[in-house]
Image (cartoon, rainbow, N blue to C red):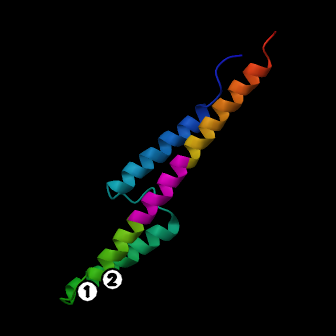
C-alpha cells in the first residue's frame, strides 16, 4: 500500500488558509454573502455619519465584528479539515496494519 490520498484535503486546507489571510488583510472576496452585505451597509452608514459630522463608532464595531466572525469561521473550517486529514491518515495506517501478509 502506498501513501494515503490526502491531496483534496490538503488543497482545501491551503485554500482556507489563503482565505483567512485575505480576511486578516481586509479583503472582501472570502466573505460570505451575508458578511459582504453587512460590511457594505456598515460602510455606507459610516460614511453618511461622517458627512453629517457624527461618530462612526457603531459602524466600526460592526465591521470589526464581521471580520472577527469570518476569522473564527475560517479557523474552524481549517481545524475541521486538519482533523479530517488526520482521520484519513489514521484509517490508512490501520488498514495497512490489518493487511500485512503475516
Q: Is residue 36 above or below residue 15?
A: below
Image location (x, y in percent) of residue 64: 34, 69
The stretch drawn in magenta includes residue 72: yes
Q: Would you name the residue on which mark 1 appears?
A: 49
Residue nearer the viewer, 91 or 1: 91
**Figure quadrant of residue 69:** bottom left
Q: Would you name the residue on which mark 2 appears?
A: 45
The stretch drawn in magenta includes residue 45: no
Query: Is residue 55 among what the camera can see?
Result: yes
Say whether marks 2 and 1 touch (CB < 8 Å): yes
Q: Quadrant of the N terminus?
A: top right
Q: Is residue 64 above or below residue 10?
A: below
Q: Is residue 85 above or below residue 4?
A: below
Q: Give the class, few, some or many, for how many residues have Cα within 10 Å of label 1's Cα (few <14, many ≥20).
A: some
Q: Which residues are magenta?
A: 68-79
Residue nearer the viewer, 49 or 69: 69
Element type where label 1 sits in the image: helix
Q: Quadrant of the C terminus?
A: top right
Amino acid at each position: 500500500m502506498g501513501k494515503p490520498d490526502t491531496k483534496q484535503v490538503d488543497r482545501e486546507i491551503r485554500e482556507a488558509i489563503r482565505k483567512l489571510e485575505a480576511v486578516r488583510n481586509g479583503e472582501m472576496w472570502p466573505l460570505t454573502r451575508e458578511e459582504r452585505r453587512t460590511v457594505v451597509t456598515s460602510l455606507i452608514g459610516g460614511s453618511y455619519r461622517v458627512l453629517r459630522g457624527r461618530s462612526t463608532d457603531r459602524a466600526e464595531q460592526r465591521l470589526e465584528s464581521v471580520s472577527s466572525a469570518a476569522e473564527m469561521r475560517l479557523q474552524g473550517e481549517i481545524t475541521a479539515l486538519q482533523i479530517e486529514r488526520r482521520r484519513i491518515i489514521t484509517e490508512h495506517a490501520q488498514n495497512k496494519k490489518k493487511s500485512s501478509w503475516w
